[in-house]
Image (tube, rainbow, N blue to C red):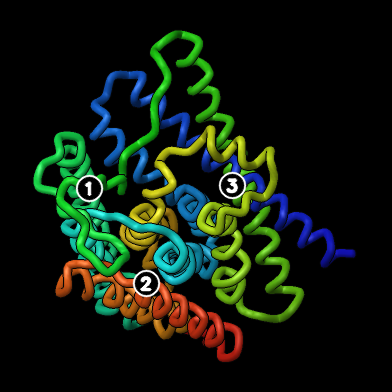
Amino acid sequence: MFLFITFLLYALGLVLTAVGSRLSGRCATWCCALCGFPMWVVSGTVASLSVALPQLVLAFLASGLSITSLAVGAALAGAVTDLGLVLALCLLRRSVTVDRGEFCRKCGILLAACLVLLLFVRDGALSHTGAGLLMALFVLFVMESIVYQYRLVYDEDLQPIGVGPKRLPRSASVPASQTMAFPAMSPGNAVKNLAGVLGGLALLLGGAWALLYSATALANLTGTIQALWAATLISFGFSLPLLAEVLHHPFGSVWKRFAVRCRIHPPAALPMQMLNSAILSLTFVLPLCSLTYRARLPVGAQFRAYDVPVCVLLGLVLLVPPLVRRRLYRWQGGVCLGLYLLYLAAVLLAPRAGA
């Protein structure tokens, strides 16, 4: 009965985080647009940050409660899942078009963040210097996103590339970060969107607490390490709504209507947003957890042995073909998916506990 209640709480947490993150992210983007901020600024800041809200809130809550394994796991395992599962399936199953320069620069930021982690967590904890460098990369990420959005709006020097045998023409559309249409300014819209932000954050906090409690209870009940559940149930659960969009299989008519209504980016932008989410998990979520923990953030042996190296490999697989050959390939998705499956096998069959 206790196990059944725990899984029921886990399912409730997934629903609340999925609804809360989309509602708060969409309404926050609307509020900024209604306040008169330029669209390219809103797209490069608030809309980009909204993709990593579930990992951010869960990791913030876990680090505040000193459950550091789940805090670090939400960030690192979430980045691996975004790249190795969701982005890989996008390359395998969908028509993908991205701007070559933006894609390569974002892959470079991802690899730089992985390098910082490799250098500054060797003793089992993220140093303050490492956290500061990750925050610097986060600032670089935001500046790069804003500049790209400006270039996208005014169609300045874009190099669209896609999955296919031929290179796309320069006139091809690059929907990598375009936002959806916004409502007209009115007091009613302003009040509704502000209420949506507050209500979405409340749902998100409730869902994060439910996931945190259920993962901790399952770890204690089964005698396993918490990092195992962060890499499986939590990270995979966060990706379920995204997988439904990639596979064109919505959970139901109610969820489909809600997901379409609260969508920030068009469906074709999903690959780039998954790359952005992985970068934010490393450069924003981890340093914020370090500040919340108020000490050097412990990074367990499992994360150092599996998560960070797999992130490096995924970043290289995604970066090299567009950098050298100026195109994307479907085999990149297959390789990324294979790396993710190997990562899951290692996590499940050979977990690494301790420092």
Q: Nearer the viewer, residue 350 or 343?
A: 343
Give coordinates of residue 129: x percent, y percent. Answer: 23, 66
Q: Quadrant of the N terminus?
A: bottom right
Of tags 3 and 1, the one toward the viewer is 1
Residue type at the position of mark 2: Arg
**Earlier sequence position, callout 2 versus callout 3:** 3
Q: Nearer the viewer, residue 264 or 347?
A: 264
Residue at 50% in and 10% down:
188
Query: Are the two marked residues, 1 and 2, in contact with CB atoms closer than 8 angstroms?
Result: no
Residue type at the position of mark 1: Ala
Q: Nearer the viewer, residue 271 or 111?
A: 271
User: Dot 1 corresponds to which residue?
Assistant: 172
User: Dot 2 corresponds to which residue?
Assistant: 330
Which type of secondary structure does the marked residue at label 1 adopt? loop
In the figure, 177 relative to 122: above or below? Answer: above
Give coordinates of residue 235: x percent, y percent. Answer: 54, 64
Give residue 256's quadrant in the image.
top right
**Earlier sequence position, callout 3 versus callout 1:** 3
Which type of secondary structure does the marked residue at label 3 adopt? helix
Q: CA distance from mark 3 to mark 1?
A: 33 Å
Give coordinates of residue 30: x percent, y percent. Answer: 41, 26
Give coordinates of residue 41: x percent, y percent. Answer: 24, 34
Q: Nearer the viewer, residue 143 or 43?
A: 43
Residue at 49% in and 23% down:
193
Residue sticking out furthest to the bottom: 350
Q: Residues within 10 Å of mark 1 (few under 14, many from 20)?
A: few
User: Dot 3 corresponds to which residue?
Assistant: 18
Residue type at the position of mark 3: Ala
Can I make out residue 331 in this image? yes
Can I make out residue 300 in this image? no
Give residue 101's quadrant in the image.
bottom left
Q: CA distance from mark 2 to mark 3?
A: 29 Å
